[in-house]
Image (cartoon, rainbow, N blue to C red):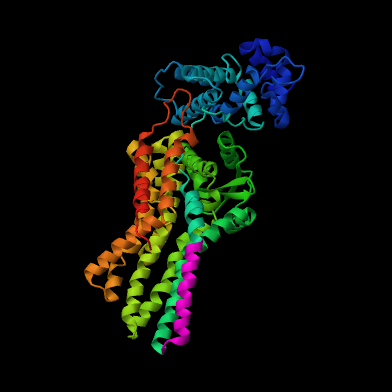
Amino acid sequence: MDIISEWAVDIARTVAPHEIDFAAEVGAAYAAGGTRRGELFGSARPGEPGGFGGGGAGQLPIILDGVRASADYLYPLLSSGLLGNALAVYALIQAKRNKQPIPPELPAEADRLMDQAISSLIRRGESYGMKGQEAEAWAFLTLETAVPPGSPDEVVRARLAGMIDTEPALPLPRCSGTVSRSWMLPPWIWYYLAAFLLIGVAGYTREWIRQADDYRRLIVEGPGEDRTAAILLIVGSVANLFPVVLFMAAVASLLLPRWHCSRAERTHALFRSDKPVIKDIERFVAGHEPGLVITSSDHGGRLARVYPGGWGEVRLGVFRDLVSLWNADRSAAEAVVLHEIAHARQKDHPVVGLGSPFADIVTRWAPVFLLVSFLPILFYGHLGGLAASSMFAQLLANLTTLPALLMAPVAALWLAEFGADRLAVQERGAEALRRALAWGSTTRPPSGLKGGLKRGLDLLAHPPARLRRAVAGAGEGAMAVLLLAWPAALLAQRALASIVAFPAFMLNGETPLQAAEHVARAVWRSFGADGLVFLGAAVLVLVWPLVIKPRTGGEPGVRWRPYLLAALLPLGLAVLGAFAPEQ
């Protein structure tokens, strides 16, 4: 009889005597893992022909699974010498159960590991339908089962080591109404791609072809000065294809996951590792998101990033800086990993993950825009071209094009990060996330123009760490702001594109009053053009609470107020757009 089978018999004798006859076989099947372990948790089959019905997992497999989940935290207490013996571990369990003060001489790491073991078991109990105190009592029963009083240290240590050598504990049951996903924000990145780009790409392409055809005729038929200006304008108009290129990049990320994976791993030297610290991270990840493949790299400058590993596979790249943080501040490092796990759960890793061509284009389009759309026109005006006045009007229009086109995708990328932060805060607390953000900001880009440019480009894909620290743990008001942030960004994008065109209209000969009227009509028409997008955003905000089902065991139900407040803006803009004048 192996060590897990013997342990299962002892557990059954103590807490599940009615299951002792098959306890050894249950222990062996659990240790074997795979299909044999899965069969222990089979659900009842009431509809089998000729069968009485009933049956289920039983108590013993669930306790063994809880012991496996807690072993990742209990074993280091004994193996690393944080606590002298198994009796000290048991005494700490009792102190936590009875809410007694912890002795000041107790190592902080030991206290943290025990708290994590307790919280992980309570979540596991709640996922099986236990309520409040019932889940807490089950958690302490499981811990006392793992470290029973009076057991020799070598036996407890060997059993925990043997349990850790088995497969990770099963993922928490995802039963409807038992697992909270209240941290999730609406998937604005997918809404942007599906509802905005998918609808708008054809329009952007048609508009560019129309402009290019006008410029082509001017090149062929116009006088020399007009030809020069038209050549510069047709080259500069390529920058307006940003939404089309962005959409193609997103499609490439989705349809070519193996290419995305090989690109990320080749660029960042990511590979599978047998280092003990990586195995420790793997065990933590397996307890939260089984199936997530861990790779590692000795590169610096980042902590961890998820990316596609293929169809249906997600990988987590762990970098040298995260390993250092894992050894220095485990809770902060776990907050980083949970943030990345949130991206995997949000399914946005093909777009925001490591090596994403979508994110690359967002951050690199600005230099392309300056090169092809801004500098040639500026150079033409400096040389005193005859069409300089009209060209400068176009230059002013171009200056609004880039920030306007970037607002919606950048807001979607930022909100994906804020949403992922919310899982880290829920699981490890706001302070752990803030410490992780502070650790990640210790390495700064070079100062001067190069450093400023790098920081500016980085902000296109990630919100500033200071803002993320401020938002971490924020209340209901901040939630409403996050919910309406993307519709507000789309509104700002449309308004900016119209309002900043005011001087361009005046350079083309309009009076201030005419230019102001022109701008007002353009802003109102933009509401009409985006009416369905705003309406869809309002509907998404309103139905999102029903999608994520944030109710858990003893928690209150949906808090509708932030969702209702956030829906007012896009709904009002959709109504306003319905009365917009025709083009």
- Specify whether residue 216 is painted magenta: yes
- Estimate the x, y position of residue 391 in percent, counting from the top left: 35, 78
- Which residue lies at the image location 29% right of the left edge and 66% below the top edge? 518
Against 232, residue 541 (above or below) is above
Against 177, residue 266 (above or below) is below
**Main secondary structure along the magenta-highlighted residues:** helix
- Which residue lies at the image location 64% right of the left edge and 48% below the top edge? 311
- Which residue, as the protein is rendered here, is positioned at the far bottom? 224
Residue 299: image quadrant is: bottom right
- Which residue lies at the image location 61% right of the left edge and 27% below the top edge? 68
Magenta segment: 202-223
Q: Quadrant of the C terminus?
A: bottom left
Q: Nearer the viewer, residue 293 or 570?
A: 570
- Estimate the x, y position of residue 98 in percent, counting from the top left: 44, 15
Q: Quadrant of the N terminus?
A: top right
Q: Nearer the viewer, residue 146 or 568?
A: 568
Whether residue 302 appears in this view of the structure is: no
